Image: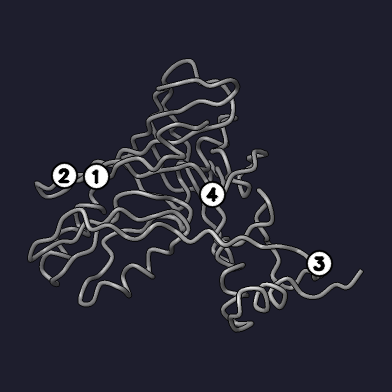
Amino acid sequence: MATDKAYKILAHQEEISNKKAKDLIDRGLVFVGDKRVKIARADISTQTLFRIEYPSEIKVLFEDDDIIAVNKPAQIDAYEIQDAMEGAELLHRLDRDTSGVLLLGKNRPFIERAIKEFKNRRVKKRYVAWVEGVVYESMEIDEPILTIKKGKAFSKIDPLRGKKAFTKVTPEEIQGKKSKVKIEITTGRTHQIRVHLAHMGYPIVGDEQYGSRTQAKHMLLHAAQISLLGYSFEAKEPKAIARYK
């Protein structure tokens, strides 16, 4: 059976450059059946049929002279959105696999005021997620988080070196052995929600980095609402979050 590098087969199949094919695989957009192709240089059969799932387009929720609020699709990097919004700068970030409200500032005085609000924990953030396991009751997670940023960022609970982090989780729905939860955070540590939920034994569905064993097209975490400086924005839940199955 003839084999070749995954990205080369994809490039031939889609009539695109090798570089473009490799980028699509690296961004997690290429599937064979229901399984995501993870290694662009993996040797596989030349008869393999790929499927590309492009992210839904970026929707602007609100814009004025100071701020732009967008509903970020999963599988798009926050910096890609910043690059697409000329003259705007990210006020915060969402993980590539997290969908939902993302805010950008349009002028320096407003950007500095907004960043100060984030630093002083005066920004209200609400998320929704599907997690593995059955969550029966609300819980408050107050565990310090240490982030290691060598290559791909990784965070962990570290009582000695970690920074203060607080997450409140409220159950909303249960389907089999999965639960839909509402999450509120007052701090914004790297991967905070993912680490805190995994630490409690409830990894987010599709979050393989922090222990999920469930196959999913992407991690099922959505930034539903954010409020700061008199503004409040809400992003409609994508289908995968609104109803798990």
Disc sitting over residue 44 in the figure: 3
- Report the front residue among 148 and 172: 172
Q: Tag 4: Cα neighbours inside 10 Å, few (<14), some, or many (≥20)?
A: many
Query: Residue visible at 36% across and 58% down?
Result: 93
Q: Amino acid at mark 4?
A: His
Q: Position of residue 175 (x, y in %)?
A: 53, 21
Q: CA distance from mark 3 to mark 1?
A: 44 Å
Sequence-wise, the earlier of marks 4 and 3 is 3
Disc sitting over residue 232 in the figure: 2
Q: Tag 3: Cα neighbours inside 10 Å, few (<14), some, or many (≥20)?
A: some
Among all residues in the image, which is located at the extreme right? 1
Q: Amino acid at mark 2?
A: Ser
Q: Mark 4 = which residue?
A: 218
Disc sitting over residue 226 in the figure: 1
Q: CA distance from mark 2 to mark 3?
A: 48 Å
Q: Secondary structure at mark 3?
A: strand
User: Measured along the vertical axis of the image, is residue 4 above or below residue 204?
Assistant: below
User: Measured along the vertical axis of the image, is residue 183 above or below residue 171?
Assistant: below
Q: Amino acid at mark 1?
A: Ile
